[in-house]
Image (tube, rainbow, N blue to C red):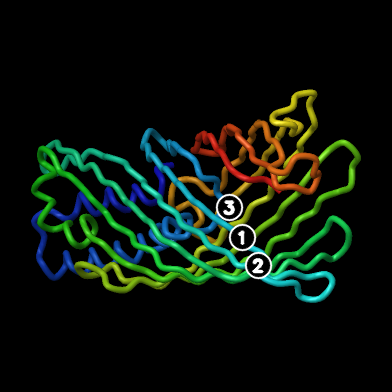
Amino acid sequence: MTPALIRIVLGAASFALPLAARAQTADLADLNARLAPAYAQMLNLTLVPDLSTAHYRVDSDGQRLALDMTRFGREIPVAPLGDNAELLARVTAGYLRMTTSFPVSNPSAGNVATRWMAYGFSGGLAVRFDVREGLAIVPALDAGLTRLSNRTGYTGGAVVSQPFLDGQIFNWDSDAWIVTPHLGIDWVPALPGRRITLHAHTAWSRIATYGESGGGKHFSEAAGVYSLRADHAMPTNLTLFDRQVEWAIFGGHSGFLGPRRSMLGFSSVAELGIGMQAPLAAGSDASKRLRIGISYLFGPHVRGWTANLGMSY
């Protein structure tokens, strides 16, 4: 089935030709309301970590979307809270770009090429509770600001649609705030000679726009995500600057929550990856590790890949 987002936009391009102004305005307002959950998912992906920073291709019934995400996050210890808890500060910055094009055949052949871009930053606090050895629960609350923009070009017969769609469905900007409660669970079983980490996470964001350019794009929506990840590191016989190099194998499953979870053309994606890592501090098994890796992402109607350089714990 054609992704819901593209199906709605195709409808916009087909009806927004010479119609009565009153009917056209009402229809465009309805379309914007139907598109709002997709906009909320774009903004949510910009700052919430469940779907990996990666290059995605969404393909459903021949209609293709390209989705690229880049996200940077840092978690900083602030203070201990008793013997079994610690307060953490969190900061995140992210960027998302989604592009597609589609033909318009009414009244004559043409094409619409459109690109959505989102970027933003957030900060917050988390508390890590060590429930037992190797098991921790991490609730958190983040708040941030984001911006969503659309840039669209028209060719051929689609040019006649431009005066009706620009500033309503296409070619607009909007700012938004986002508030996100998180819940994470980490489990690190004690296995000699191996480093295994299991992580589960869910988040449900509230997103509302302000300062919109043009009419009809204000919305207040909720967007939920979840992820399950596993990480397995094994020592090798290699050393680098007196630091033992480890193989890392990792995988996971992430997706959207809610009745409109397929608005971007897919609802979930799996990840399989491999990499190598080495501790920052020589001779310390508890040290953070610098990792380089590559992953393949796949799911119904979606494929992707990512190469990453970052920290593991």
Q: Residue at x 56, y 54 (%)?
A: 49
Q: In the displayed image of the protein, which residue is found farthest to the top? A: 237
Q: Are marks 2 and 1 in contact (CB under 8 Å)?
A: yes
Quarter-of-image position of residue 36: bottom left
The front one of 248 and 238 is 238
Instruction: Look at the numbered disc 2 and give the secondary structure of its residue.
Output: strand
Instruction: Look at the numbered disc 1 and give the secondary structure of its residue.
Output: strand
Q: Pinpoint residue 203: horizontal percent, then vertical percent.
A: 59, 63
Which numbered mark, 1 or 3, is in the foreground of this view? 1
Of pointers 2 and 1, the one earlier in the residue sequence: 1
Of pointers 1 and 3, the one earlier in the residue sequence: 3
Quarter-of-image position of residue 191: top right
The quadrant of the rendering that contains the N terminus is: top left
Q: Pinpoint residue 114: horizontal percent, then vertical percent.
A: 26, 46
Q: Pinpoint residue 73: horizontal percent, then vertical percent.
A: 54, 55
Q: Residues within 10 Å of mark 1 (few under 14, many from 20)?
A: some
Q: Residue at x 70, y 47 (%)?
A: 288
Count of numbered badges drawn on the protein: 3
Q: Which residue is mark 2?
A: 88
Q: Which residue is mark 1?
A: 75
Q: CA distance from mark 2 to mark 3?
A: 19 Å
- Residue 11's disc is none
Q: Which residue is mark 3?
A: 50
